[in-house]
Image: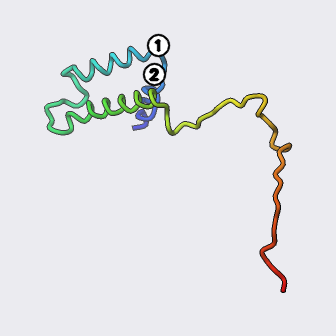
Amino acid sequence: MRATPFLYQGFRLGLRNPSLRPWILLGILVYLLSPIDLIPSVLPIVGEMDDLVLLGLLLSELAQMALGDPFSPQTRPKSPARAEPASTQTIDIQATSLDEDP
C-alpha cells in the first residue's frame, strides 16, 4: 500500500502537465471502456469499484483544475508600491481606562 500515495501524486501531476494530460485521459478512457480490469466486473459490487474510484479521481482532479484547488494557499505577488516592511508600519491606538476611581 506504500505505492498508493506515489501513484496518486503521479496521477495528479500528470493531469496538470499539458504534454501528459491527453495521454492520461486517453488511458483512463481506454481502461474504463475495456473489458479487462484489475478487479473483474463479474463480481457484483467490488468489480465496479475500480472503475468508480478511477472515475471519481478523474472528475475531482478535473474540477480542481477548472475551479482552482480550494486547499492550496493563494499566493498573490505584491505590487512594489504597496509592499512595506512590517517594521515601518505604525498603528495608533487611543486607550481609555475601564477602571474608574471614585
Percent x, y of residue 99? 79, 78
Name the residue type under label 1.
Answer: Ser
Q: Residue 24: x, y in percent?
A: 38, 19
Q: Secondary structure at mark 1?
A: loop
Is 101 or 54 nearer to us in this picture? 101
Front residue (pair 80, 42): 80
Considering the numbered disc 2 on the image, is that residue within a helix, a strand or a loop?
A: helix
For label 2, count other residues whose C-alpha is less than 10 Å away and answer few (under 14), some (14-19) or many (20+): some
Quadrant assignment for the C terminus: bottom right
- Give the residue displayed 49% in from the left and 19% down from the top: 17
- Read off the residue under disc 1: 19
Task: Tell me which amino acid carries mark 2.
Answer: Gly
Neighbours of disc 1 within 10 Å: few (<14), some (14-19), many (20+) = few
Which residue is more in the foreground, 50 or 29?
Answer: 29
Q: Nearer the viewer, residue 62 or 43?
A: 62
91 relative position to 34: left or right = right
Q: Which mark is residue 85?
A: none
- Give the x, y percent position of residue 7: 42, 29
| Label placed on residue 14 | 2
At 21% from the left and 19% from the top, the residue drawn is 34
The residue that appears at 18% across and 22% down in the rendered structure is 35
Image-based side of 51 in relation to 73, left or right: left
